[in-house]
Amino acid sequence: MSEILTCEALTKRYEKDKTALDGVDLHVSFGRIVGLLGPNGSGKTTLIKLANGLLQPTGGSIKIAGMAPGPDTKALVSYLPDADWLPDWMRVEQLVEMFGDFYADFDPAKASEMLAKLNLSPKAKLKTLSKGNKEKVQLILAMSRNARLYLLDEPIGGVDPAARDYILSTILNNYQKDATVILSTHLIGDIEPILDEAIFLKDGRVFAHRNAEELRETEGKSVDAYFREVFKC
Amino acid sequence: MLKKLLKYEFKATGRVYGGLYLAILAVAVLMGVSFQIPALLVHTAPIAVLMLVYLALGVAIAVMTVLSIIQRFTRNLLGREGYLMHTLPVSNAQLILAKLIPSIVWVLCSIVVVLLSFVLFSLFGTLNSAAVSEFFHAFSRYGSEIGKLLSSVIKGYGVTLVLMVLEWLASLTCSILCIYTACMIGHWCKKYFVAVSIAAFVVLNVLQNQLLNLLPYNTTNTGLDLVFSTSAGDGSIVYTVTGNKTYLWAVLAALAADLVLCAVYFAATSWLMKNKLDLE
């Protein structure tokens, strides 16, 4: 199995008239950092949720390492949603313990080290943290796993520019080289330096799936500039 | 994994229940003690306030127990926290059981705590040295007779009693699973989640009752028969307890029906979770 993520004719309709994904075909290999790029409503979050089994496809199929989403794939995937998703009555240290309990690949020492570096107290209750610090805790938990696939939905959207660099270096330094990281974001300029591939979604379809280096050479412009050209309003 | 899920579910729910339980037990003791203070029997305002608080706590526990069954399922599995729960490497069956088992335990605990609060209130309200000596006097005089009566009941009716308790537990489980199925149906038509969930719960209950009415046994007559007679030898009282066989079969039939319904609701909830889960 050389592909970590495979979508074939993947379709998701929320209501009869609202198609979020329309016949998406995607093949993503192990060991890549992939940008999932597209304007609002292009289907990025829907695709990530389908990969996590949080949504069910209307048509087609989605597979993680050759398996349909289920308990086996969830052991391989580390997911960071774009919303608050953790029980906010819990303390940070309780969340670390919880992740350690459920995920065999979770590294509590790595989580503690990252928390200390960002001056986040393990004793703090999640609900007492600011929005940015909450997002940092969530990212630390997701990146402290030695997963095969990281699905990060807008991981830098809510934090200040200074913290973005740290978060991006956290992502870069905390995944095994044979694992794949898929990041969805609008802030293409910030993630461009780390991208191996870029998937452009437009109106629920794959507009382009390009190697980042090849795109820059062929188009003679950055991924960010290409995005702005393609999705010009 | 189920054990770990249960650990976190009890942690999450215990915070609320623990406080309410302690509060009602403390108020029951205070109420009992205040009945022993003669001045308060004249100026009854403090006792009235305590009674109101006690009643409010009783209602709060009842409402909390029912609401918590619904909320823990909808918020934790179908709301924002569902992003976490459904990305844990556990099966849907484990997720459902991790909600069901604590719900049953909390219903039982709530009943026990309310009963215990009655006992504490009665104890602290009536306890004095005369009452204690009267109690032990009565116990030494009638204790052996009570023991004989109880052993006769257990001998003649014990199996039925055990089955009745099991049937009640199965029926409780069935009701909770019916709520889960109704919530999953509501989630399927999420635009009208509340209305569809309530309608589904009502329809499922009507269907369930129609099916249970088809059972060949009537469960209203317990068939418990207690006969007192005097022994020909030493003149002591003899207790003969018999249970009606028809009732025994009726309880068995109801238990079997409950278990089948539990299996149907569990399978339906699990199927809907696997095939129709759409977290916003």
Image: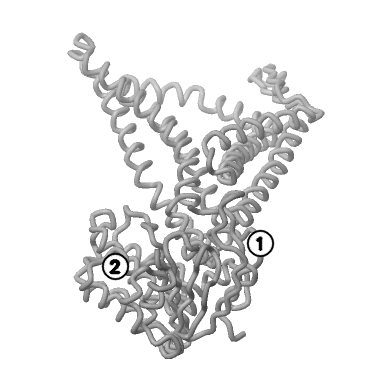
- Residue B176: x and y in percent read 57, 40
Task: Give the foreground label among 1 and 2.
Answer: 1
> From what the image shows, is residue B267 above or below residue B153?
below
- Residue A68: x and y in percent read 62, 69
- Observer-nearest residue: A212 or B47? A212
Q: Quadrant of the C terminus of chain A?
A: bottom left
Q: Which of the numbered marks, if any, corresponds to residue A59?
A: 1
> Is B53 placed left or right of A4 in the picture?
left
> From what the image shows, is residue A51 above or below residue B82?
below
- Residue B163: x and y in percent read 67, 37
Type of residue at label 1? Gly
The residue lying at 46 percent from left, 26 percent from top is B140
Q: Which element carries disc 2, helix, strand or loop?
A: helix
The residue lying at 56 percent from left, 72 percent from top is A73
Taking the view exactly as shown, the residue that stands out farthest to the top is B42
The residue lying at 49 percent from left, 52 percent from top is B77
- Observer-nearest residue: A20 or B121? A20
Where is mark 2, residue-wise?
A136
> From what the image shows, is residue A44 above or below residue B18?
below
Q: Chain of mark 1?
A: A
Whether pointer 1 and pointer 2 mark residues with C-beta atoms closer than 8 Å, the reply is no
Which of the 4 image quarters holds residue B203? top right
- Observer-nearest residue: B226 or A205? A205
> Is B4 placed left or right of A172 in the picture?
right
Type of residue at label 2? Lys
Q: Which element carries disc 1, helix, strand or loop?
A: strand
